[in-house]
Amino acid sequence: MPDPAPWTGPLPRLPGGWHEVLGPHLESSWFRQLWGFVQAERAGGPVFPPEAEVFAAFEHAPYDRVKLVLIGQDPYHDDGQAHGLCFSVKHGVDAPPSLKNMYKELATDRGIAPPSHGNLEAWARQGALLLNAVLTVRAHTPNSHKDRGWERFTDRVIDVLNASSQKVVFALWGAYAQKKGKRIDTSKHVVVTAAHPSPLSAKQFLGSKPFTAIDDALVAAGHAPMRWEL
């Protein structure tokens, strides 16, 4: 199937002050090609998250309030899960395995009992940008929107934060997220790494105290530590 034509209709407007720093990229030919692809995919069947929630991470963590970036990979691909924040699911949806492992480690690391839900909006509202590298996915088809342009868009997100005068902590869990680290000026910002919390690497993640590492880095950068309770 040939690539869809570049999108000529209305383009999305990013919330939370992000449009002022990223808007020119949305006018580019490569983003129009990406948006045309996503619209063609939606015309052919369900795509997650719903269009109104694709940029939810930016809405909950406005540009001038970001102190922490946590990078995921691909949105959840089953019904009702993805809502625009990496690792997070909507209220009433069972926590997926990676999130369950995060909760296990949160209990061990910070003594916080696992919550009864998987919605991480409370973290985002504290200035945590919960950013997937790819922002959409075809229903029930993991990585179906990989290498279509979202990675380039999220690189631009990292670039504008890297250029920011405010110190930002980047939490890069797993090899995929850590590839983004090459874009970050570590003389200005702080990068903390850990294994990915997925079942495939849980043995390395559990017990590594990644939440303590994030809080220590935030304090060193002049920010308040996270309130992890949900």
Image (spheres, helix red, strand yellow):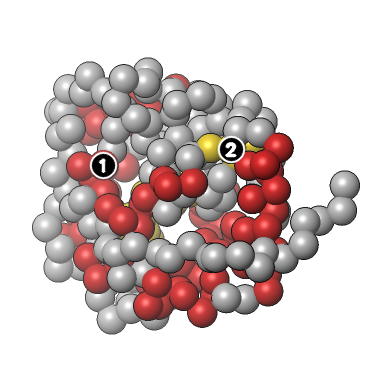
The residue wearing badge 1 is 121
Residue at 48% across, 40% down: 50
* Figure check: 210 above or below 127: above
Report whether residue 17 is seen: yes
Instruction: Judge the density around disc 2: few (<14), some (14-19), many (≥20) Cα neighbours within 10 Å.
Output: many
* Count of number-bearing discs: 2
Tell me the CA gap for discs 1 and 2: 21 Å
User: Which is nearer the eye, 26 or 71?
Assistant: 26
Q: Mark 2 falls on what kind of element? A: strand
Is 144 on the left or on the right of 219, as rendered? right
Residue at 15% across, 63% down: 223
Q: Mark 1 falls on what kind of element? A: helix
Residue at 17% across, 22% down: 113
Q: Amino acid at mark 1?
A: Glu
Residue placed furthest toward the front: 9
Q: Tell me, for residue 182, which label it has, or none.
A: none
Q: Amino acid at mark 2?
A: Val
Instruction: Judge the density around disc 1: few (<14), some (14-19), many (≥20) Cα neighbours within 10 Å.
Output: many
Q: Position of residue 88 (x, y in %)?
A: 37, 35
Report whether residue 149 is seen: no
* Figure check: 75 above or below 20: above
Q: Position of residue 20 (x, y in %)?
A: 37, 78
The residue wearing badge 2 is 47
